[in-house]
Image (cartoon, rainbow, N blue to C red):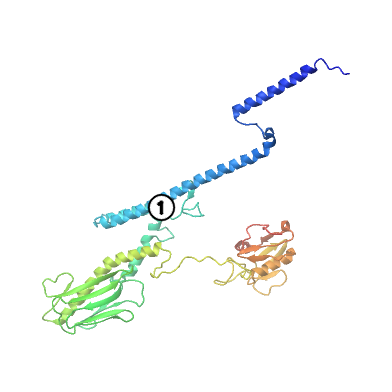
Amino acid sequence: MSISSINYSSSVLGAQIRNINQQLTDLSTQLATGKLSQNYSGMGTNEGFAIAGRSQLSNIAAYTDTITNVNVNINLANTALQSLTTIRNTVQTGSASTAQDLNVNGQTVAQNTAASQFGSMVGVLNTQSGNRYLFSGTAFNTQSVANAGDIINGTTTQAGFKTVMAERQAADLGANGMGRLVQTQPTPSSVRVSEDVAGSPFGMKIAAVSSTLTGATVTGPSGSPVSFSVDLNGLNPNDGDKLSVQFTLPDGSTEQIVLTASTATPTPAGSFAIDTTTPANTATNLNAALNTAITKLANTSLVAASAVTAGDNFFNTASSAIGAPVNNQAAPPAPISGATALSGASPSNSISPGFAAGDTITVNGTTLTFVNSGATGNQLNVGDSIQTLMSKIDQITGTSKPSTVHGGSITINTDDAASLNISGGTAGATAALGALGFSSSPITATQ
């Protein structure tokens, strides 16, 4: 029979009291914090679930932030695009409804409005959300378009729109200011107008000629360069007879000159005088009136059409200065392949920059030298293919799996990737290695 200590029951009671006190403390903490435990060990069997749940909550919070940011960017982009419509309507309305009076700078109100709205449009295209340009695609830290002032006025190295427009206008007007048309009087009774050069993309083009001039002979438009002639044959036309000439302008629009034979004094605008006493003078009057009408057309409608075409040449990358639609955007380079040459002149299939004679690269301590021809040993001809270079590298590394070039990517295979080291021994070789995609040393390889 055993006899318990007289303190046994009291120690058991104390332990129970302490346990209850701890439970009370834990429950009070849970009530105050709203948490089951202050650490994962207190979660018991739910510890794993709590850790996973916290990770999911963190992911959900990240997704929520991303969605919020995307919504902000979408709303900003939508607002910006809507403002472009407003800008377009403002310019169109101003062009159609405002007076054409010129200010001290020689511009109309509509022109000033268009200039300011162009600046606004450029600002819209360069809209930023935080430090990101919304309309720059993956180049989000680069402006979408150049500054409005640079586009219009140019920079020290680039021509702006004003320069391109002035050059186009000079080309369209020609040296004589008649839209590159040449006017002569082959005989005392005839007048001839021709384009200056066959197939020229600039100036006015003779489209059609019609006449009701009594006794006159009209020839053309025909020939190369295109021309037409009017011969009065020594006779006077009747009062009210007309000569009509239609021209095509650089932007594709057409304009027409109509000259009326007249005996009125003074001679009305748009007419030429009939000399009843000397018919030869009537041809001279027709020649002078036609010259005046062509010059006026060239310095009004042609100038406007030239500006429109210059704008298309400048802003539309699918057009050219000759007015023919072409795709003059830079074509993406063809991806390298095993057959791509290590060096060569354009347009041969070679890397740029390529290797040159005298360049050296080092592969795992072995130096490879590039020569013009007759390569032996640890040499390669600069005209060899990339696959030849890969084979030479494989010989040095002793790989059991040949290196490959596929889809523009080079894969260097080696049995010991950690030991592979390829570097350029000369500046030219370093640049050529960069062209091949070797950006560091040692390079990344597969094993």
Above/below status of 349 relative to 102: below
Q: Dividing the image into 4 quarters, which one contains the C terminus? A: bottom right
State the residue at coordinates (30%, 65%).
303
The answer to whether any part of residue 129 appears in the image is no
Mark 1 surroundings within 10 Å by alpha-carbon count, few (fewer than 14), some (14 through 19), many (20 or more): some
* Residue 122 as seen in the image, left or right of residue 368: left
State the residue at coordinates (25%, 77%).
209
Tag 1's secondary structure?
helix
Q: Dividing the image into 4 quarters, which one contains the N terminus? A: top right
Pick the front one: 300 or 403: 403
Above/below status of 279 relative to 38: below
Pick the front one: 163 or 435: 435
Q: Residue furthest bottom?
A: 233
Picture quadrant where residue 259 is located: bottom left
Query: Which percent across, then down, holds residue 305?
Result: 31, 66
State the residue at coordinates (53%, 46%).
66
Query: Which percent across, then down, holds residue 180?
Result: 31, 73
Q: Residue furthest front?
A: 1
Pick the front one: 270 or 27: 27
Query: Which percent across, then down, holds residue 87?
Result: 35, 53
Above/below status of 328 relative to 420: below
Picture quadrant where residue 296 is located: bottom left
Q: Mark 1 = which residue?
A: 81
The answer to whether any part of residue 33 appears in the image is yes
